[in-house]
């Protein structure tokens, strides 16, 4: 039986952080063993918000590609490519825009939220999830690994596939979201790690900067002095210990009794986190020193992706009598 197809995408936000790594990339790296994978860096989507900062785009794309590869995505198993290199996404998006009623897009939850929050009002921003549907359907993907927040976009993608198929005959399978089990990882201030909160530690952060950021991290606000009893269950440092320190259970009791101070606890975290990330960081440094390797991988990835996208578009044009 042919391998099932996975399409995943991320906006080129620049260097990725531990939240991206734990919440998405590690999962993608595991999935590439069993699926044919397409990992898309969605630069057109990034324009919905950053259309006035396009000069930052080339470096942001490069950094995301470097982080994909340092996390362990293998170009032999997974086509890594830039969305705007495959013009077929734009054609499919345009054709979809003819058959999808505007209210379907207006009722996507992220639309109203972000429109108000970020003041976005462009035509392209309304079409954001439709472009995403094109990204997914053009590869006739079976699965899309996403966080919970993206499920409405996957549901819309399925509706788009159904509507197209009912008008023109079956071209598209209905893809399914593949939820990542991982809980959001806390940033240095205890909120969800996010670049926009500036509470993040990047994958390529130096050991020194990692140490400095963790030393400043929030802990249990009730543990003011070293010997005060702490509550590991609400402490963001402990949440990170659970992920990065194999001996995290040994820290629980001494924290609750006040035997273990935050400074000492943090230094254990710094050590194990830096240890765990050392191989990723070493790969990152190697790739950054050889940008041509990275660009070659993106071009090869685009060639593989394009072949599949071109085939789908032939089916689409034929089905719509545009061949
Ligand atoms: N909307 C996604 C996000 O913000 C990015 C994205 C664009 C995407 N196209 C996609 C994700 C296709 C998965 C599949 O994370």
Image (cartoon, grey):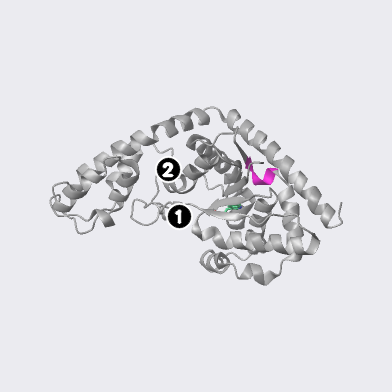
| Among the 4 quarters of the image, the one containing residue 152 | bottom right
Residue underneath mark 1: 196
| Residue at disc 1, secondary structure | helix
How far apart marks 1 and 2 lie (CA) works out to 13 Å
Question: For this rendering, which residue is in front, 53 or 98?
Answer: 98
Q: Is residue 140 above or below residue 81?
A: below
Secondary element at image label 2: loop
Q: Is residue 87 left or right of residue 147?
A: right
In the image: residue 86, left or right of residue 230: right
**Residue beneath the point at 59% across and 67% down:** 108
Q: From the image, which quarter does the N terminus lie in?
A: top right
Q: Residues within 10 Å of mark 2 (few under 14, many from 20)?
A: some
Q: Earlier in the sequence, mark 1 or mark 2?
A: 1
Residue at the image point whose x is 79% and y is 53% from the top: 316
Circle 2 residue: 202
The residue under the point 62% across, 33% down is: 297
Identify which residue is drawn at 48% across, 33% down: 284
Viewer-closest of 132 and 11: 132
User: Residue 99: image x %, image y %?
Assistant: 75, 65
Q: Can residue 184 be found in the magenta stretch?
A: no
The answer to whether residue 112 shows anywhere in this view is yes
Q: Quadrant of residue 175?
A: bottom right
Magenta span covers which residues? 81-85
């Amino acid at each position: 039986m042919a391998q099932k197809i996975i399409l995943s995408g991320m906006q080129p936000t620049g260097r990725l952080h531990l939240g991206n790594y734990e919440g998405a990339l590690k999962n993608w790296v595991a999935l590439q063993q069993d699926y044919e994978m397409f990992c898309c860096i969605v630069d057109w989507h990034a324009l919905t918000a950053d259309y006035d900062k396009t000069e930052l785009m080339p470096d942001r794309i490069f950094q995301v590609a470097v982080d994909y590869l340092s996390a362990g995505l293998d170009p032999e198993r997974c086509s890594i490519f830039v969305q705007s290199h495959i013009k077929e996404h734009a054609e499919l998006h345009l054709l979809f825009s003819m058959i999808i009623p505007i209210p379907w897009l207006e009722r996507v939850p992220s639309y109203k939220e972000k429109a108000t929050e970020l003041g976005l009002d462009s035509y392209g921003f309304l079409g954001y999830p439709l472009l995403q549907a094109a990204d997914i359907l053009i590869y006739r993907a079976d699965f899309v690994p996403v966080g919970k927040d993206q499920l409405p976009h996957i549901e819309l993608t399925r509706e788009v596939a159904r509507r197209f198929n009912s008008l023109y005959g079956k071209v598209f399978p209905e893809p399914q979201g593949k939820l990542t089990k991982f809980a959001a990882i806390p940033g240095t201030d205890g909120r969800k790690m996010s670049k926009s909160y500036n509470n993040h530690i990047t994958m390529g952060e130096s050991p020194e900067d990692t140490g400095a950021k963790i030393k400043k991290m929030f802990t249990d606000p009730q543990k003011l002095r070293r010997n005060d009893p702490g509550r590991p269950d609400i402490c963001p440092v402990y949440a990170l210990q659970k992920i990065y320190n194999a001996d995290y259970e040994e820290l629980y009791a001494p924290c609750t009794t006040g035997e273990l101070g935050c400074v000492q606890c943090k230094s254990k975290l710094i050590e194990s986190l830096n240890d765990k990330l050392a191989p990723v960081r070493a790969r990152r440094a190697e790739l950054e020193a050889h940008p041509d390797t990275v660009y070659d991988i993106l071009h090869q990835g685009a060639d593989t992706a394009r072949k599949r996208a071109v085939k789908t578009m032939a089916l689409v044009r034929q089905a719509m009598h545009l061949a």
